[in-house]
Image (spheres, helix red, strand yellow):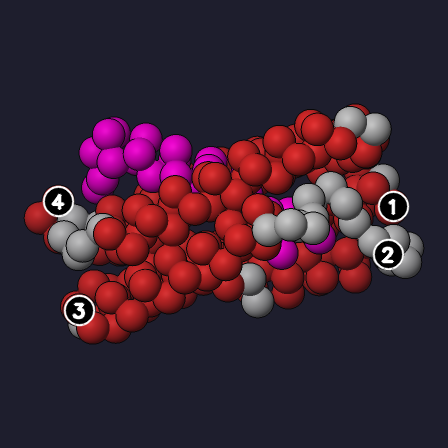
């Protein structure tokens, strides 16, 4: 099992990841603003199930396979760093958009909201990168089996992500209204997100395999 320090370090990175813009955040914010917080929370249920699917895939062999194949691990690690760098550029470039600047979406039934949340997460390259390239950096074969470590780290990521996304879904309308009337705050939010993404991209690119 991972020690407390490892779990806290991974939780901190998971927090930084969930606070940065990506498909999950954009979808949840859009749903909450267009259809209300309840729709955002139902969509979050689908996103949470997607996290569980990713965690089980990693725990049942994908992460162990990547840890065992250095070139595959390095390819995914560098690919993830490039993707995070691209997200950082999208936030920082002139004319970049905040996830709280969203287009209108049609009203959907709860079942479809849940399903769309699940699909959005399963097709989210940022989450794939977390489980296939970032999480293996925290798995230490010297501390026991890969499976229990992966499950512990995955559960930590899910807990952090669901808690933060729930708060974002509930407060999306208020946050969007606040930022919409304060251009400087909106710009600061984009630069903060871009800076966090850039730092994570640099960390991933420079980190070597344990």
> How far apart are the two marked residues, 2 and 1, measured between alpha carbons?
8 Å
Residue farthest along the front direction in this orientation: 94
First in sequence, mark 4 or 3: give its number: 3
Question: Closer to us: mark 1 or mark 3?
Answer: 3
Secondary structure type for disc 1: helix
Q: Nearer the viewer, residue 50 or 128?
A: 128
Q: Is residue 148 left or right of residue 122?
A: left
Q: Mark 3 and mark 2 in contact (Cβ < 8 Å)?
A: no
- Where residue 3 appears, x then y in whole percent? 21, 34
- Secondary structure of residue under mark 2: loop
Residue 206 vertical placement versus 194 (above, below): below
Looking at the image, which is closer to me, 205 or 110?
Answer: 205
Counting residues from the N terminus, which is met first, the one under dot 2 or under dot 1?
A: 1
Report the residue marked by disc 2. Answer: 105
Mark 2–mark 1 contact, CB under 8 Å?
yes
Q: What secondary structure is marked by label 3?
A: helix
Q: Foreground mark, 4 or 2?
A: 2
Magenta segment: 1-27
| Mark in front: 4 vs 3 | 3
Kindly indicate the quadrant of the structure image that contains residue 67.
bottom left
The quarter of the displayed image where residue 85 is located: bottom left
Calculate the distance from the C-alpha at mark 2 to the C-alpha at mark 3.
Answer: 43 Å
Badge 3 is on which residue?
A: 70
**What count of labels does the image hold?**
4
Q: Quadrant of the N terminus?
A: top left
CA separation, marks 4 and 3? 20 Å
Pointer 4: what residue?
Answer: 143
- Foreground mark, 4 or 1? 1
Residue pointed to by mark 1? 35
Could one spot residue 53 in this view of the protein? no
- Main secondary-structure element of the magenta-colored stretch: helix
């Amino acid at each position: 099992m991972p020690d407390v320090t490892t779990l806290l370090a991974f939780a901190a990175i998971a927090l930084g990841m969930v606070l940065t813009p990506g498909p999950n955040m954009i979808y949840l914010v859009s749903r909450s603003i267009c259809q209300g917080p309840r729709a955002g929370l139902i969509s979050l249920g689908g996103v949470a199930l997607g996290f569980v699917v990713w965690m089980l895939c990693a725990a049942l062999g994908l992460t162990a396979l990547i840890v065992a194949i250095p070139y595959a691990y390095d390819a995914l690690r560098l690919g993830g760093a490039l993707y995070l760098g691209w997200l950082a550029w999208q936030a920082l470039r002139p004319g970049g958009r905040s996830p709280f600047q969203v287009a209108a979406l049609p009203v959907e039934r709860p079942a479809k909201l849940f399903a769309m949340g699940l699909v959005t997460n399963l097709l989210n390259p940022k989450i794939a990168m977390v489980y296939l390239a970032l999480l293996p950096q925290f798995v230490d074969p010297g501390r026991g089996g890969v499976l229990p470590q992966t499950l512990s780290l995955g559960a930590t990521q899910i807990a952090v992500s669901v808690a933060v996304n729930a708060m974002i879904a509930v407060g999306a309308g208020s946050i969007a209204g606040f930022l919409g009337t304060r251009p400087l705050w909106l710009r600061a939010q984009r630069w903060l997100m871009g800076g966090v993404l850039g730092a994570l991209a640099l960390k991933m690119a420079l980190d070597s395999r344990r």
